[in-house]
Amino acid sequence: MTDHAASLPRTPARRSIDSYDPKGKRVFVRADFNVPTDDAGNITDDRRIRGALPTIQSLISRGAAVVVASHFGRPAGIGYEAAESLQPVFVRLKELLAGQAEVLFAGQTPTDSATQAAVAQLKTGQVLLLENLRFEKGEKKGDPAFAATLAGYADAYVNDAFGASHRADASMVALPRAMKSRGAPALAGRLLEKELQFLGAALEAPKRPFVAIVGGAKVSDKLLALSNLLDKVDMVIVGGAMAYTFLRAEGVSTGSSLVQPEMIDKARDILRTAQERGCTILLPIDHVCGRALAAGTETCEVIGGIPDGWMGLDIGPRSRDLFAEACLTAKQVVWNGPMGAFETAPFDVGTMTIARAVAAATRTGAITIAGGGDTASALDIAHLADALTHVSTGGGASLEMLEGKRFESVDVLDPA
């Protein structure tokens, strides 16, 4: 294994909420409550809401009044939209904090008169959830005027929105700047600290052997992460549809599988660079194929090249064994992206096998970290979300950390 090149400078530790006395203060907590919902508007995964509880509970227990804000969905930014309201989040947050804090919800936008009145009347021990930040056009634009209005709501700012920390929205960057300009603290919440600690340490001071599992549909989505990881890991396991672009780059026939022709040269470059740096790349050696990506489609298992008329939709049994064995030899695993079309049986077996292998590696002492919405969903389906060292709440944010990027929204917070 060659020496690993230095990465981008790691963000220094940020000041924790533990160092701040919130008694009698109003504290603005930027959370990430952009949770998935079904067609009826019911929350299908409340992990991000539960993730913010330790920060809110700490502040309330120490005498604060808490203003919580988040974006949700993709509203037009021209005012209230019922379909994008945080009402379902309010209901769930109220349930989760029952007996600990009174949770309030007011107004139709974060800065209307009803909201401002509710903020002014907020008492110690109460939590006020603002309506969707993106109902205001200034949020996505990073508008300092919108941020200045929000800054008037509180005595301190807390970023607990790791899932949004790769964005430069007003509540993420302009707001803490506005509050700091008048001497108010800008702090890191419990969830943000945890995410930065696990993902940061994994990349900066990894335990070895360090195995990265990268899956999903497109090489283009993971190109920067793959390029950055080659300097840090001992092995990269590539699965999902993106593996077929790599196989095509190696001259393997891929049938009707999803391939990005414009990325073949990039895939070839990654394979060559990995070899130069002493990083092993494992690609699937067999496949579960279908005539189409649909339940009930005709299927077959293929070793090596995929015949015309067939799509590779999951890794095959030999690949499952190969990849699982690699996971079990690791002291650290970072996983981002499924191994196949796991939402559709029987193409879920590869992803579930890897989920069990990563969980088994955890039990033998490995540090295991998963990131990305599909990976988290797969772990939930496998009932293994609690079996890993850490499952990130950030999809795009965790991927950008794997790419080696720093976040302006984190850098703006007070240093520890």
Image (cartoon, rainbow, N blue to C red):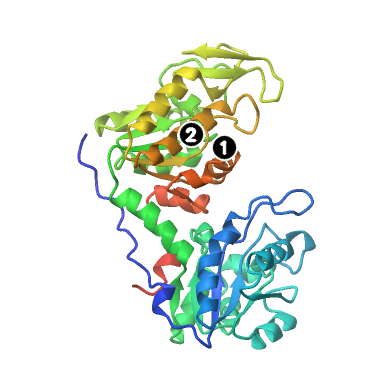
- Do the residues under discs 1 and 2 have CB atoms within 8 angstroms? yes
Residue at position x 40%, y 20% from top?
A: 250
Determine whether 70 is above or below 125 in the image: above
Q: Can you identify the residue that label 1 sits on?
A: 382
Residue 270 seen in the current view:
no
Q: Residues within 10 Å of mark 2 (few under 14, many from 20)?
A: some
Pick the quarter of the image with the N terminus. Answer: top left
Residue at position x 69%, y 83% from top?
A: 118
Query: Which of the two residues, 366 or 98, is positioned nearer the viewer here?
Result: 98
Q: Residue 158: percent from the left, percent from the top?
A: 49, 73
* Distance of label 1 from label 2 (alpha carbons): 8 Å
Pick the quarter of the image with the C terminus. Answer: bottom left
Query: Which of the two residues, 119 or 407, is positioned nearer the viewer here?
Result: 119
Residue at position x 50%, y 38% from top?
A: 337
Earlier-in-chain disc, 1 versus 2: 2
Q: Amino acid at mark 2?
A: Arg
Determine whether 168 is above or below 288 in the image: below
As drawn, is 151 to the left or to the right of 267? Answer: right
Q: Residue 398: percent from the left, percent from the top?
A: 46, 51
Determine whether 240 is above or below 413 in the image: above
Disc 1 is placed on an element classified as loop
Residue at position x 52%, y 41% from top?
A: 384
Query: Which of the two residues, 106 or 383, is positioned nearer the viewer here?
Result: 383
Query: Which of the two residues, 294 or 27, is positioned nearer the viewer here?
Result: 27
Q: Amino acid at mark 1?
A: Ala
Q: Can you identify the residue that label 2 sits on?
A: 356
Q: Residue 183: percent from the left, percent from the top?
A: 43, 86
Disc 2 is placed on an element classified as helix
